[in-house]
Image (cartoon, rainbow, N blue to C red):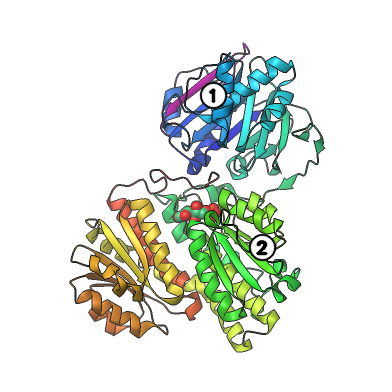
Amino acid sequence: MCGIVGYVGHRQAYPIIIKGLHRLEYRGYDSAGVALIGKDGQIGLYKCKGKVDDLERFMAGKDAESTIGIGHTRWATHGAPNDANAHPHFSQSGRLALIHNGIIENFRVLKDALISHGYTFRSSTDSEVLVNLIEYVQDTNECTLEEAVRIALRQVVGAYAIAVIKRGDPDRIIAARQSSPMAIGIGEGEYFISSDAASIIDYTQKFVYLKDGEVTTIEKGKPLQIKNLYGEPSKVDIQKLEMSISQLEKGGFPHFMLKEIHEQPDTLMDCIRGRVNPDTREIVLSGVLDNKEHFLQAGRIIFVACGTSWHASLIGEHLIENLCRIPVEVEYASEFRYRNPIIRKDDVVIAVSQSGETADTLAAIDIAKRAGAFVYGICNVVGSSIARATDSGTYIHVGPEIGVASTKAFTGQVTVMTMLALLIGKLRGTVDSAFYHEVAGALLDLPEAIRKVLKKAPEVEKLSRIFTYAHNFIYLGRGYNYPTALEGALKLKEISYIHAEGLPAAEMKHGPIALIDAEMPTVVIATLDHTYEKTVSNIEEIKARGGKIIAVISEGDTQLRHRADYTIEVPGTVECLMPIISIIPLQLMAYYIAVSKGRNVDQPRNLAKSVTVE
Ligand code: F6R
């Protein structure tokens, strides 16, 4: 969370920083700020509560001329979202300005020590402690700023990506990283820094991703040098990022979320392309084939993930247990990391993450690796921390997801999990060849099926308007579609702020049915599968208690068309792929309810997209 961006070179820094901050706003949007070094060598620091637009208004008429600067968009961890807590932060003397993404866990101890040395603080942030610590270290050691940063960071416990500039030094930014992302974009005699390389893709495609414990001084016109916290040189590994700028724009849609929902036929094709051969319906995933023995010998597969990625993993559990006959566990990464889990050397741990930066998932990977397990990643963001920390993996390749509510990543993750399960099942001889080819063929047909569902958007919009009154929703599903119910409920709550609970349909009668009345709509995924009749009975139980039913049903299902109060018909596919189809109307419904309620769909309150803190 929090987005940081910086520039040093020959261009005007402010427009680059503002554009980068807009693109990073998905990481946090409660306050924003910039620090620029003017012609006189002084640091101009401007920040305010609110979004990047508010910062731009605040900057109107101010002198922003500078060829070096750093900027920040915040998701509050320590201290309320207000002007004082916004970044950048000055050091006590005003000599240094710093931006920070992460959490300094031992900030209280450090702050007390600095107070005893006469430091006072203007904000309640851990980040201001860090900039003062760097200043104090530099003053007491009479060293360069980079050395001071290295010495200071050796005293820090926690997560950080930081950038620091110094008054009177318009050519250098010091940057460092530990557990929070930091990409350095390399131009002609100029450098860019960002929490997300995509935000600066207009200027360069060449990037270096700092690794944990690395520090660099990026200096205008000088080659890049990277060191560890003890000053020893590290390898500079330049990577190319292929991405088009149009992927970062709304493309005529009112919100990124709606654009991303509608992109799914194409993003799924991008995910499948080159992996499912349309002629032979054979699956090729090099990450699996190159590491065959781990999957052949796997005693167990453990998924670790958070949020939507955790829901996709629950579907992965069904797929792998069904097709590969390997026992599977699905863990919240945040619980796994603190549970002293039993991990065996023949376990394969699959870490699932859209952003590839989720702190809890990264920590779970670390635990699994230390225990000797083989760790496989399913990520979207190319070159992300999780992609780099895992032994091997498969990208979902659905393109940048900017709306805070995850949509196309979910369908991409389930698609990758299906290919993974089919391939492993084939390698282990646990999947019937006809079924293997049937599911592989069905994957190729998914984009068309999703297009059909998307045509129902106006119908879903109309239906959604009816339900803006509701304060609570229940979502029900069974089997492969139980995780779909969880995901549908999560979508609704995060962007409309309506309470919603996802449940396995048959669990209703064990308690939650007590909630049912005419005010509590129930969304049921009741497509034709092997539990269909049971789900129909669950619907009857709810109707008998006066509940209203919105059902996602299979095309042509006249039985439920008449029994449910409202229905959305979707095309069929093999049962294991149904979540990819049935989630689409639920994404649309959450979107339209949120829009009817006037919510900020792309930037819902209290949330941020990339959860790089615990
Ligand atoms: C929900 C959502 C979150 C993320 C979760 C994990 O719409 O976006 O629940 O799924 O924070 O994020 P990643 O997948 O980036 O690890």
Q: Does residue 341 belong to the magenta stretch?
A: no
Residue 399, image x and y in percent?
Answer: 57, 55
Position of 80 relative to 483 (above/below): above
Q: What element carries label 1?
A: strand
Position of 456 relative to 103 (above/below): below
Which residue type does callout 2 highlight? Tyr
Q: In which quarter of the image is residue 352?
A: bottom right
Determine if residue 366 is in view: yes
Characterize the local packing of mark 1: few (<14), some (14-19) or many (20 or more) Cα atoms within 10 angstroms.
many
**Distance between the alpha carbons at the discs numbered 1 and 2:** 39 Å
Q: Which of marks 1 and 2 is nearer the N terminus?
A: 1
Viewer-proximal residue, 6 or 110? 110
Q: Which residue is drawn at 60% across and 43% down?
A: 196
Give the residue pinned by disc 1: 89
Give the residue pinned by disc 2: 376
Which residue type does callout 1 highlight? His
Q: Does residue 49 belong to the magenta stretch?
A: yes
- Magenta stretch: dominant secondary structure: strand
Q: In which quarter of the image is residue 163?
A: top right
Position of 272 relative to 364 (above/below): below
Q: Is mark 1 within 8 Å of ligand 1?
A: no
Q: Which residue is drawn at 34% across and 83% down?
A: 534
Residue 33, image x and y in percent?
Answer: 50, 28
Residue 148, image x and y in percent?
Answer: 70, 23
Q: What range is drawn magenta here?
A: 35-50
Determine if residue 564 is in view: no
Viewer-proximal residue, 399 or 434? 434
